[in-house]
Image (tube, grey):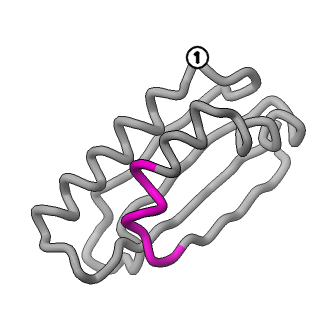
C-alpha cells in the first residue's frame, strides 16, 4: 500500500471567499475520483487547517501499489481535475509518497 500526501498553497491574489470556493471545488473534484481510478482505495481533501498551518489544503490518498499511484497520475479523470480545479489556483505543491 502507498500513501500519497499533497500540501498546496493557493495563490495570494484570491480573496478569502474565492479561496474557500476554490478549496471546495478541489475537494469535490478530487474526492469524486474514488471508484473511478483502479487501485485508488481512499481519498480525502482537508480544507480547514488550524491558523498555525502554512498550507491551504491537503490531499490524503491511499493506493494499492506504487504502480497504481503512477497510473493515477496520468489517468484522464485525474488529469482533468488537476488541470481545471487545482493547477490554475495553486502556487506551491509539496508531495510525500511512502509505502506502509
Q: Which residue is rendered at x = 87% and y = 42% of the image?
A: 66
Specify the farthest residue to the top.
Answer: 35
Locate residue 70, reporting x and y percent.
82, 43
Against 87, is 11 above or below? Answer: below
Neighbour tally class for label 1: few under 14, some 14-19, many 20 plus, Cα within 10 Å: few
Q: Looking at the image, is 17 positioned above or below residue 67?
A: below
State the image coordinates of residue 4 (x, y, percent, origin top left): 68, 50
Above-or-below relation of 2 to 36? below
> Residue 64 at what x, y percent from top left?
80, 29
- Determine if the magenta segment contains residue 72: no
Does residue 89 show up magenta in the picture?
yes
Q: Residue at x 32, y 55 (%)?
A: 47
The quarter of the picture where residue 89 lies is bottom left
Q: Which residue is mark 1?
A: 35
| Residue nearest the observer in this picture, 53 or 55 | 55
Looking at the rendered structure, the number of numbered marks drawn on it comes to 1
Q: Is residue 80 left or right of residue 84?
A: right
* For residue 79, side relative to residue 25 (left or right): right
What residue is at 58 percent from the left and 60 percent from the top?
6
Q: In what quadrant of the picture does the C terminus appear?
A: top right
Mark 1 secondary-structure assignment:
loop
Residue found at x 22% / y 64%: 19
Q: Name which quarter of the figure residue 86 lies in.
A: bottom left
Q: Position of residue 77 (x, y in %)?
A: 58, 31
Quarter holding the N terminus is top right
Tell me if 29 is positioned left or right of 78 in this view.
Answer: left
**Residue bounds of the magenta highlight:** 84-92
Q: Is residue 63 left or right of residue 28?
A: right
Amino acid at each position: 500500500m502507498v500513501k500519497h500526501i499533497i500540501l498546496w498553497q493557493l495563490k495570494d491574489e484570491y480573496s478569502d471567499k474565492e479561496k474557500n470556493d476554490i478549496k471546495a471545488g478541489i475537494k469535490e473534484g478530487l474526492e469524486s475520483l474514488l471508484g473511478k481510478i483502479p487501485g485508488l482505495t481512499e481519498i480525502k481533501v482537508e480544507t480547514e487547517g488550524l491558523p498555525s498551518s502554512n498550507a491551504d489544503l491537503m490531499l490524503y490518498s491511499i493506493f494499492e501499489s506504487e504502480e497504481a499511484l503512477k497510473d493515477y497520475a496520468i489517468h484522464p479523470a485525474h488529469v482533468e481535475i488537476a488541470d481545471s480545479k487545482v493547477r490554475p489556483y495553486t502556487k506551491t505543491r509539496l508531495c510525500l509518497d511512502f509505502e506502509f
